[in-house]
């Protein structure tokens, strides 16, 4: 297992980048402990956008960063059919957009056809990659990659995903 960072060291990545943070999100379900209760409330019929206290610190961080000129973007791979988790996330997405994050969507079939990876990662300033490692209880940590050839491979995947993905707004119109 490679060396992983987590906790404050991982959180610091989102405060220390200079201009751009981009994520490839490829899992149909994430078992994040902080999402268990809000996801259950959604299952119980509580409207997502009226129940965002659990997400507020992240939304505030995105808003502060984007207001200072930084860019937060992600492409989310969608399973076919959508998992229950992804249906919930699709309802959460407008809050991320309102905070300034840009979110695009790509079907699992398209991701597979394009040779995109099955693991999640963040690219910071096109110079540092955080490869995310998950376990049964959610995120274990991130492997930090700065070796130029490896970062270039991740950058290529980013470019491919961005060309093929559809904006959240366009997706929900169809």
Image: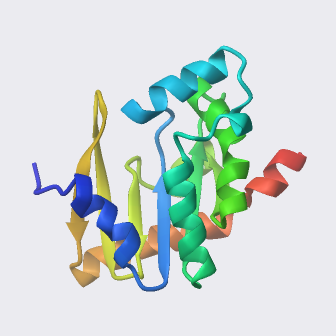
Position in image of residue 159 (x %, y %) = 54, 73
In the image, residue 17 sits, relative to residue 140, either above or below, namely below
Q: How many marks?
A: 0
The quadrant of the picture occupied by the C terminus is top right
In the image, residue 137 sits, relative to residue 151, either above or below, namely above
Position in image of residue 14 (x %, y %) = 40, 68
Q: Which one is nearer the viewer's eye here, 95 or 103? A: 95
Q: Would you say 16 lies left or right of 157 here?
A: left
Q: Which one is nearer the viewer's eye here, 53 or 87? A: 53
Q: Which one is nearer the viewer's eye here, 66 or 126? A: 66
Q: Residue at x 10, y 48 (%)?
A: 1
Q: Which one is nearer the viewer's eye here, 52 or 96? A: 52
Q: Residue at x 64, y 17 (%)?
A: 43
Q: Would you say 153 lies left or right of 64 here?
A: left
Residue at the front extreme? Answer: 53
Q: Residue at x 64, y 55 (%)?
A: 96
- Does residue 158 appear in the picture of this structure? yes
- Does residue 30 appear in the picture of this structure? no
Position in image of residue 83 (x %, y %) = 59, 27
Q: Residue at x 43, y 75 (%)?
A: 155
In the image, residue 135 sits, relative to residue 25, either above or below, namely above
In the image, residue 77 sits, relative to residue 169, either above or below, namely above
Residue at the top extreme? Answer: 44
**In the rendered image, which quarter is residue 18 located in?**
bottom left
Q: Would you say 20 lies left or right of 2 here?
A: right
The coloring applied to the image is rainbow
């Amino acid at each position: 297992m490679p060396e992983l960072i987590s906790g404050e060291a991982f959180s610091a990545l989102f405060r220390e980048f200079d201009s751009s943070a981009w994520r490839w999100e490829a899992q149909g379900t994430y078992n994040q402990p902080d999402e268990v209760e809000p996801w259950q409330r959604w299952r119980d019929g509580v409207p997502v956008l009226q129940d965002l206290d659990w997400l507020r610190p992240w939304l505030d961080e995105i808003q502060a960063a984007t207001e200072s000129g930084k860019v937060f973007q992600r492409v989310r791979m969608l399973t076919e059919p959508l998992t229950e988790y992804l249906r919930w996330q699709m309802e959460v997405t407008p809050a991320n957009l309102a905070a300034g994050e840009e979110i695009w969507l790509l079907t699992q079939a398209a991701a597979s056809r394009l040779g995109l990876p099955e693991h999640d990662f963040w690219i910071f300033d096109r110079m540092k990659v955080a490869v995310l490692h998950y376990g049964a209880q959610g995120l274990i940590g991130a492997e930090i990659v700065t070796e130029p050839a490896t970062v270039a491979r991740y950058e290529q995947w980013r470019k491919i995903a961005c060309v093929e993905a559809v904006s959240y707004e366009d997706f929900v119109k169809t």
